[in-house]
Amino acid sequence: MLDVNRIANKVEEAISLPVVINEVIKVASHPGSDAKKIAEVISKDPAFAAKILRTANSSFFSFVSKTNDIDAAVSRLGVKQVRTIALAAGVGKMFKGEDDVEGYSRINLWTHSVAVATMGEMLAKMSIKREAKALASEVLLAGLVHDIGIILADQVMHKNYSEVPALAKQLNSPFFKIEKDRYGFDHAKLGAIVLARWKFPNSIVSAVAGHHKTKAIEEDTMTQLVAMAEFMVYPFGFGFSDIPGVPPKMFSKLQKNLGILGPAILKIKQSFSEKLTEALEIFQDEKKTVEV
Ligand SMILES: [Fe+2]
Ligand SMILES: [Fe+2]
């Protein structure tokens, strides 16, 4: 068995977030923060400012008019949305690289993460419950980082970790069960510890920590949205998945708890692949068409 905190220390030694991302996290988490302050921070990094502009003008966010002004872009997106894009840009880079092993590749894991994020946002928006609706922009971030622990584990203990995807495939088992048996902790725990050290919002850290735990899923709305999104994207088969299937009983329970009615599910299924293509254009930094 391994000590998860020691692995998290290794991650911290090996990987750090870009300065501008750390600044955005700091400013956005400040109680009195507004769009203007975040725009100031972003303007200091021209490449990053260009990315925010591209994102604000993208079809994913579907604003009617285009803008070339970073202040306007930030205020139309809002503080939470800008924080999501900033953090996504910071972590998205970690998913690059061709370290494919059997049953898993970083880029496919990122596609899966973008799919869960996009689906989570759609579910929140379609919910008839106000509490779930209010989480739409935050669940986008939670979905993007929900499996970051897989990348981090792969990064710092690659040789050993590369057997996990192969075993998961062979045994038709979720990653987290194999990880717990081998290491005594899973990617959800490692991801949550590192995200907390990087000062990600608490609600995101808890959703990441609990996304494979039945009790946590039942008790926390954000965690429920991530879990339900993961179940919803599974049949589409986008990218790779760290779960081998969807437990039907749990699916209907989540649907009821989150207030997502049958017609809403149908509507989401119809528009999901188009929305995902738009999301991948932003979060993958390259145009990619998704085929169903
Ligand atoms: Fe996971
Ligand atoms: Fe996942």
Image: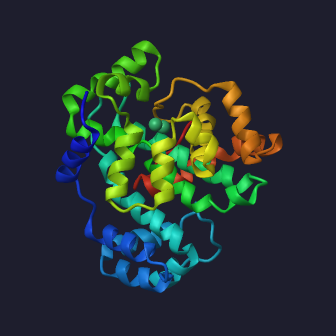
Q: How many marks?
A: 0
Q: Nearer the viewer, residue 203 or 219?
A: 219
Residue 214 percent coordinates (x, y): 58, 34
User: Can residue 69 be seen at all in this image of the molecule?
Assistant: no
Above or below residue 69? Residue 286 is above
- Residue lying farthest to the top in this orientation: 170
207 with respect to 178 (left or right): right
What residue appears at the point 82 percent right and 43 percent down from the top-left corner? 263
Return the x and y of residue 172 as percentages of the image width and height.
47, 16
Say if 214 sits above or below 134 in the image: above
Q: Is residue 89 visible?
A: yes
Relative depth, front residue between 67 and 161: 161
Colour scheme of the rendered structure:
rainbow
* Image point (49%, 66%), residue name: 55
Q: Position of residue 175 (x, y in %)?
A: 41, 27
Q: Quadrant of residue 178?
A: top left
What residue is drawn where x is 27% and y is 29%?
Answer: 161
Rendered-image quadrant of the C terminus:
top right
**Up-down: is 242 above or below 91?**
above
Using residue 166 as the reference point, say whether residue 274 is left or right of it: right
Q: Quadrant of the N terminus?
A: top left
Q: Is residue 290 left or right of residue 185?
A: right
Q: Tell me which residue sits at (35%, 70%) in the image.
A: 48
Q: Position of residue 239 (x, y in %)?
A: 47, 35
The answer to which quarter of the image holds residue 179 is top left
| Drawn side of residue 46 relative to residue 254, left or right | left
